[in-house]
Image: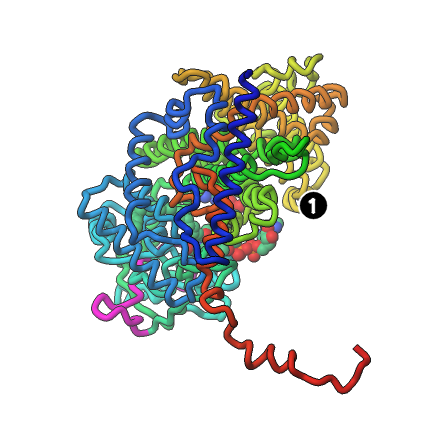
Amino acid sequence: MGLSGISLLTTTYSLILQHQSLLLCLRAKGFGLDLKKDMEGVDYLSDERKKAQFDVEAMKIAWAGSLEAFQLSDRMAKLVANDPAFEKFTRPMLGRKELIKNTLRKAAHGWKLIVDLRLTEEEAKWLRLYIDEPAYTDLHWGMFIPAIEGQGTEEQKKKWLPLAKKMQIIGCYAQTELGHGSNVQGLETTATFDPQTDEFIMHSPTLTSSKWWPGGLGKASTHAVVYARLIVGGEFHGVHGFIVQLRSLDDHSPLPGVTVGDIGMKFGNGAYNTMDNGVLRFDHVRIPRDQMLMRVSQVTREGKIMQSDVPRQLIYGTMVYVRQTIVADASKALSRAVCIATRYSAIRRQFGSRNGGPETQVIDYKTQQSRLFPLLASAYAFRFVGEWLKWLYTDVKERLAANDFSTLPEAHACTAGLKSLTTSFTADGIEECRKLCGGHGYLVSSGLPELFAVYIPACTYEGDNVVLLLQVARFLVKTVSELGYKKPVGTTAYMGRVASLMQNNCAVQTAEGWLNPGAVVEAFESRAARMAVRCGQQLAKYENPEEGFAELSADLVEASIAHCQLIVVSKFIEKLQQDIPGKGVKQTLEVLCYVYALFLLHKHQGDFLATGYLTPKQASLANDQLRTLYSKVRPNAITLVDSFNYTDHYLGSILGRYDGNVYPKLYEAAWKDPLNDSDVVDGFYEYVQPILKQKLRTAKL
Ligand SMILES: CCCCCCCCCCCCCCCCCCC/C=C/C(=O)SCCNC(=O)CCNC(=O)[C@H](O)C(C)(C)COP(=O)(O)OP(=O)(O)OC[C@H]1O[C@@H](n2cnc3c(N)ncnc32)[C@H](O)[C@@H]1OP(=O)(O)O
Ligand SMILES: Cc1cc2nc3c(=O)[nH]c(=O)nc-3n(C[C@H](O)[C@H](O)[C@H](O)COP(=O)(O)OP(=O)(O)OC[C@H]3O[C@@H](n4cnc5c(N)ncnc54)[C@H](O)[C@@H]3O)c2cc1C
């Protein structure tokens, strides 16, 4: 018997096992048989795993970034998965109060582990990821502490950071208000200096000045960094951050003049409802002068404003930091959804049975591949661009500490643009994964609805994605307008070759011609440069640049997307120029890199054609190549998602189980639903039976 014969037999056998275990479960409900007799311990995806053309263990390390990073992440994943305190299956069924209490309990347990096991900051971040539940601690560690680190003076850091890092105070980041989020300069909360008492008076003068949204504010925080209009001597001196105590450290009650609470339920069950997003109002609350974060500007005892050499934009610095972390998190959320959809697509069969043989695995349908594999490739692309962005941010942070602010504008543009690009794509990608799983994807037990609900606000928080792309557009327009006298550097260096990028057209003649990193990068550079220059030319027609910018904003957003996609493609290609050990690892990543680039090229071919860089024939060759690439991904699909090294606990999905034992577990889970605790539903006798028993007086229905 040939290899294919053996494989057919094994597949058929796996299928029979699945059907057997399903039958056992069915009987379990109907005839009282033991559910445990389902095929626990069988790996239904083992055939798929045998198809891998690369070393999976080496790919896990490439995905993690290094052996050490892999080991660290793996240790934390197992620590969480093996600790019953972090169970999360019941989460979507909890009421809000229970949900929040449950989250507080988990956060306390997580903190205890951090202290008892003396975990490093890096380990704590992985622990948080695998606990997989948004909590007030995210804002405390992710925004309150970074705001003090970035905007506080040495003295302020010395006073507040030890308290915060030992969690003797809990802080949040209170910027957004009911009336303003995007427009930070439009905030209405006031901080008025009182020279008599050497204090600031924090006040909420209008309803719309109420702080609204800050995570951790609603119920947990004792303190906040509050962004408010600085008023000294009756004059407005811009928006600044102030450390304000909100609740008593004894009994947690709000301090006098402070009104604080939760803003209410958000989208989905469980999901982001584990977070106490809050509302906050001040009624002339006094704080000492030294609680204004004073690295950027200082207010003296006499009420003088002193500006340091630090640019004003540093007040927005915490957002740059968090946007960078959000890019790294996009690859985690997308890869998680893709892992679920890929494994399930290999288990799920529909149509195509011949002579009583097995039906076709849905992953073998070309349409399924053309929807799923670009998402898989994007997860890897975002992982590598996130790695690069972390490096960029670390570099900027070191420079800022040394008062070198030269790279801040580029860091702002990159973090804003990539945050927008990766979160929008990931949110859409998770929903696509749900659809790729058919009906079962809509079940909470697939893990996808909650993942979607918890993820989508990433398109809004830390800057609405369109508002952020407009920031990138400002940066691009400025770069284009300075081309005559200033050499562009960093991610806009390609603009320095704008003349040739505008002139030279694509030289690709065959589908294989697209398997060339130079050709791919040049295509993305030309498209981005041409779109930015075109916007610049259009803008020049307006007398008032702001009016022109507003009028052309939709085109400017598209130019920003083109620029950001170029960054992701280039960073993937640069990654592949590094040494990546392991049999077949680099080759497999090369395939994914081309899938990512050519998928984008196909999706946005309108841009490439309209800018005149490509001919329709060349665009069509790219699509031909894409089809070939999908066939190369297919045998590696399962092991590519195994390489994320996600535990079943983290995935939280029956469809995405490592062993592929989907049907029995779905069936079992259904019977665990509280609705199935009794055969006759609560309310039947009051509301259903009377209808059944009614005697209709009219026969017209
Ligand atoms: C269990 C135990 C656990 C243990 C702990 C473990 C550790 C856990 C760690 C967890 C980490 C996770 C952290 C992540 C959590 C994520 C949760 C998210 C919660 C959400 C928070 C928020 O949403 S906070 C609020 C965010 N708000 C915004 O983003 C507002 C968006 N708006 C703006 O950014 C701005 O207002 C603006 C940029 C859109 C406009 O501002 P403005 O009108 O002032 O500016 P201009 O357009 O005129 O620009 C002026 C000038 O400034 C430049 N610029 C703008 N922004 C920046 C910037 N950020 N940095 C640098 N420069 C900037 C701009 O380019 C202009 O420059 P010119 O040179 O003048 O052109
Ligand atoms: C889950 C969640 C958690 C949050 N956590 C915090 C937190 O911890 N701390 C905090 O301070 N804030 C927090 N926020 C608030 C968040 O930062 C803001 O909601 C966000 O910055 C968007 O601002 P906005 O709500 O004012 O949107 P808006 O600006 O009102 O956006 C509404 C629409 O207008 C469009 N728009 C706005 N301005 C422009 C423009 N100039 N040009 C074109 N279109 C425009 C937008 O694209 C969008 O379509 C959180 C929000 C959410 C959803």
Q: Residue furthest bottom?
A: 697
Q: Quick check: 323 above or below 222?
A: above
**Closer to the camera, 115 or 532?**
115
Which image quadrant is residue 302 in? bottom left
Q: In this figure, which residue is indicated by the disc labeled 1?
A: 551
Percent from the top left, x then y, of residue 573? 51, 21
Which image quadrant is residue 217 in? bottom left
Q: Is residue 501 visible?
A: yes
Percent from the top left, x then y, of residue 47? 49, 28
Residue that appears at 73% across and 26% down:
609
**Closer to the camera, 349 or 376?**
349
Lateral position of residue 697 relative to residue 159, left or right: right
User: Which range is magenta?
Assistant: 233-256
Which image quadrant is residue 245 in? bottom left
Q: Quick check: is 189 in the magenta stretch? A: no
User: Dividing the image into 4 quarters, which one contains the C terminus?
Assistant: bottom right
Residue that appears at 38% across and 53% down:
88
